[in-house]
Amino acid sequence: MALQNLKDFHRPDAIEDVLALLGKDEETLILAGGTFLRGLEARGLLSGVEALVDIRRVGLDKVVADNNGIKAGAAVTFTRLRGVVARQQEAWLGGLADALDRPPVQVRNVATVGGCIAAACPFFDVPTALLALDAELTIRSSDGERHLPLPELFDGLFANTLEPGEFITEVSLPRPPGNAAGAFLKLEATANDLAIVNVATQLSIDANRVCTRACVALGGGVADTAVRSAAAETILVGSRLDAAALQAAGEAVISDIDPMSDHRASAAYRRAVAKVMTRRALERAVARLA
Amino acid sequence: MNSRMDVVGHSVERPDAFDKVTGGKGYPVNVRLPGMLHAKMLRSPYPHARIVRIDASRAEQLPGVKAVLLPKDVPQIKFCPVFFVPAEAPSMVLDFDVMNGEIVRYVGQPVAAVAATTAAIAEAALELIDVEYEALPAVFDPEEAMQPGAPQLHPNSPNNIAVNPSFVAGDIEQGFADADFIFEGVYETQRVHTCYMEPRVCVVDMDRQDNITIHVTTQHLFGTREKLAFALGLPESKVKVVKAPYIGGGFGGKLELTAMEPVAALLSKKTGRPVRLEQTRQEDFITTTRNPIKVYLKTGVKKDGSFTARYAKSILDCGAHATHGAEVINVHGAFGLFFNYHAPHAKWEGFTVYTNNMIGGGYRGYGAPQGSFAVESQIDEICTKLGLDPIEMRLKNARKQGEPHPFNPAFTLSTYGLPECLRQGAEKIGWTAAIAAPKSEGAKKRGFGLAVHPVWVSGCMGFPDIYEHSGAMIKLNRDGTADLATASMDIGSGQIVTLCQIAAEELGLPAGAVRMSSQSDTDNVPFDAPTHASRVTYSSGNAVKTAAAAAKKRLFEVAATMMEVSPDDLEVAKGVVSVKGAPGKSVTVAEVARRAESPFVQMTPEGPKPTTIEEKGTIIGMASLSPKSNPTPCAAQFVEVEVDTETGQVSVLRAVYAHDIGRVINPAAAEGQIEGGFQQGMGYALMEEIQFDPETGACLTSDFLDYKIPTAVEMPRQMDSIFIETNEPTGPFGAKSIGECCVITPAPAIANAIYNAIGVRFTQLPITPEKILRGLGKI
């Protein structure tokens, strides 16, 4: 057992209590759904953890959806967020809906939107989708609140940029302008596998069906973190999203990724399929545009 | 074929189903005894090293630690831990020991153990045991291990060859000279785990007089008793193995003694308390696996597709100890490679080779999947090259019903429905039209493939050294039900319901009226060979049927006295004993059982009625016997796949599986076996592999985050199971068996379908998306 230094498990009822616990001189890990705890623990990655703080009772389980977008508390489960997204019936949330459907139902019912981000695991699905949605995080500490664009949270494999005493309280997804649609695709060995490669795309077009805005995000071991592909986005913006543009965008992701080789796949394989999956995810988003 | 029966041939509900879906209290993993301690084993981090010194003094001082077990505390006895052979079987290799004090030969070999008040304390104590090793050169590739100068793992095995079986028929050189074409290929299979759900676990109580009681996940009660006693130098009767109502899967993965059982026993004796030892998933991954085998296969063929010569050389990586590897190689050669097809000239050389890898083990199919992948792949290569029909090609060369058994002239292939399996399977999937259909122009290509395979029901008749007999005891109750007790373990595949159905049919009781005892152990039931080798329905089924027949004989004697007729005039069905041809004259089985167990005067509606000595005595039947033969179930499998040529992903869209398993005792259970077998075979074909660090030999596969098996989502959307019900004369009600046939053919059938889809032949399992893209030249 690799949580051999664990001394305390806390279930506070208020954010202030969380902050107080984070202020103690202990190696503390915030726990929400806990779905990745066992995987990290079995690989010896939590050997220093002395206290677990479960934040599921501190009121971070609310979702607000309006014309400006969606704001979800950090402890909102995938299942709950999926329900809200389904009720919106908006094409711009298509990629998020796809991604929330991918983990097995047992995971969806407990895994949280804040937890999957903070884990900084490049093989997860929902963070890739959030990256394509320009998600912004609200971060609390005893000093107050600050806001952080999602890419700035990732600091490498299983590492985030949060300072000691900080934790994520909310995720904001701004509604993209105009006629927008998103899509997400995952390549996996089985339906309960982590991603070998996943891709989220987000497209907006003007009245002439010219692309005004494009987001392409990739995860699943294409780099130490989920990444955006500026090269692909540049090709798409201003194009008519025809087959040639989508193909070129797919090819372009190569310049923005640095895949790893692991037991799931080699870097060469990830490079090859990242191109294909990007093109397919773009085709899926285009098909959803009004 | 027997006429329609009341219980056999019906999908009777499994008596264990309710308990399993509501938590399954019958599993050994749930056993807790008062005062029980928890044990953990310290394992070697080196693939090959000398143990210089072990110091456990720091661990002993950790609060909560009750005992530390070191190699010096463990009897240094070498034996074969495989359950289905004697511990000193001459055909096996006696190289296994529980805890070697001098040398480690693989990463993960146990070198010490701790018992403590909690598992967490025991685990923490392991880190306080100081072991000094002197590293030795290691070898992980079996062909390198066979070279001169390679590190030698065992003193009496030059070139690390543990066993080297072979056979020759005819003149192989002449056979190749007679051939119009010669095909050669090298086929490689990987190391996979059965992935049973319940981990290996035991709870052992050993007292100071060396009496042992053990609750354990095992496929063989009496094998556990014999091997545990042998490992500890005790008489067998000192060990009582409690029969769990069922275990959470086995698939051949719980078919030998490992360090776990004797270590827990010795810790129990040392502490005077029961000791529980449960392995983690990673420990299970490095305890037993299917042996990887590399097959060099060379076949001589005439223009018309008939074989003139078949040659194979098989290199089996048995890891640090031979154990199952000494027998898997034989089954692989005899059944995996050479059983199904004739050739006037044949030659095989098998090598079971030591390496510093983990020990291999039993796994459903037992060497046949590795052989079938080679043979059934190469037949398709031959058909492609020579433009032959793959069904006709197989039928032309396959053995036929009525022929002598190829490996045991005492038997004939009394039932062998392979042609009918091929015919009905092909018809169901629409084979002729399917393979003629043009390929799609898109990125996703569809393809069809087939493979066939027979198995031998039981490892028994014909192979030396292998235990093969079964026992059963049946007792009639006064309420018209019966209790059945056997040592045959239900490992999840429905042995309980099948055996109860056989007993009920023979006794003329309704389905559900026969119950499997949940309170058996090695003290109170007769010997049975393991639940392995597809043998239980056939072999244990025969014993159960014979025991039921004995009980029925006594039932008729008592009933005859009651009814004042001859026992020969009686018949029984649906719980009622009646006089043949006189339907009105009957008594219920319950009335007869009550009569037999009543006091000397029985109260009846007609008033008190004396009973006679002849009528009295519980109606029981017992049997302990070996089956008469060793029949051969066989199967033909057809699959349709779709290959995504841009990602390399393979989806199996459809599977049709036609089996000749003799009479089907329980169709739903048989279908479950077939679908589960396909799932395991499909994982073997496409994704499963335990991975190791090539430098250190350490296992990189920790759990199911790393090791992927097909889920319901990956299973074909359509699966058809077809039963060709031949009537096996030596089987219970005509039954043969189903356990292994279904796991053997998915890999070659899928490989053949992939070839049909994209024109690329894969000869190394698993056929991952990455290999497909490489095969297509895309990476």
Image: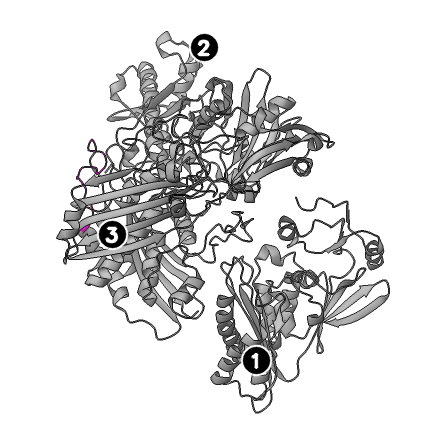
Q: Are marks 3 and 2 on the same chain?
A: yes
Q: Amino acid at mark 3?
A: Lys
SS type, badge 1:
helix
- Measured Cα–Cα span from mark 3 to mark 2: 74 Å
Q: Amino acid at mark 2?
A: Pro
What segment carries the magenta color?
Answer: B397-410
Q: Residues within 10 Å of mark 1 (few under 14, many from 20)?
A: many
- Measured Cα–Cα span from mark 1 to mark 2: 92 Å
Residue B323 image point, x, y percent = 42, 35
Please say if B375 is above or below B622: below
- Measured Cα–Cα span from mark 1 to mark 3: 51 Å
Q: Which residue is mark 2?
A: B599
**Residue located farthest toward the bottom when viewing the structure as drawn:** A208
Q: Are marks 1 and 3 on the same chain?
A: no
Please tell me whether the stretch drawn in magenta is mainly helix, strand or loop: loop
**Mark drawn on residue B298:** 3
Question: Mark 1 or mark 2: which is in front?
Answer: 1
**Residue located farthest toward the front when viewing the structure as drawn:** B149
Residue B717 image point, x, y percent = 41, 59
